[in-house]
Image (tube, rainbow, N blue to C red):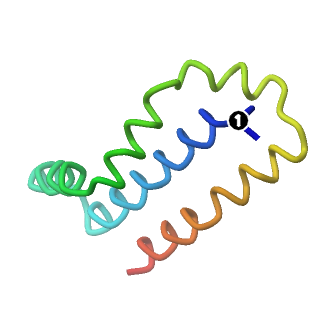
Amino acid sequence: MDGIKETKEAMVGFLKLSVLLAANFKDGFQAADVSVIIAKITGDEVLKAALLDAYNGIDKIGPEMGHLTIAEGIELAMTAMPEIVNLIGALKK
């Protein structure tokens, strides 16, 4: 189903970034966190690609959501689940 490609990419990119931010900010925000986060993003090709995919085509999410089917909603939930598990793990550490 390619009818929700951009939405899936944006959701995955946002969740991957959320995991990184949760891991770095759970002890509070310090200015040094910014350089650590930037270094982790630039050093992680998978994360960098996910963020780039999330950004490219973000303008197509509205139209994709305008005709979301039940099957596409389930596909979005299944795509999000591994990333949500990672986020919960990052918050627990």
Secondary structure, mark 1, is loop
Residue 90 position (above or below residue 69):
below
Q: Quadrant of residue 49?
A: top left
In the displayed structure image, the side of residue 93 where residue 68 appears, left or right: right
Image quarter of the N terminus:
top right
User: Residue 73: where, in percent of width, then height?
Assistant: 81, 46
Q: Residue at x 65, y 56 (%)?
A: 79
Q: Residue at x 33, y 67 (%)?
A: 23
Seen from the viewer's position, the closer of residues 47 and 34 is: 47
User: Residue 7: where, in percent of width, then height?
Assistant: 63, 36
> Please, which residue is most extreme toward the right here?
70
Image quarter of the C terminus:
bottom left
Seen from the viewer's position, the closer of residues 83 and 49 is: 49
> Mark 1 Cα within 10 Å, few/some/many (few <14, many 20+)?
many
User: Residue 13: where, in percent of width, then height?
Assistant: 46, 46
Q: Residue at x 44, y 71 (%)?
A: 91
Q: Residue at x 45, y 37 (%)?
A: 53
Identify residue type, mark 1. Ile
Residue 14 position (above or below residue 78):
above
Seen from the viewer's position, the closer of residues 15 and 30 is: 15
> Please, which residue is most extreme toward the bottom here?
93
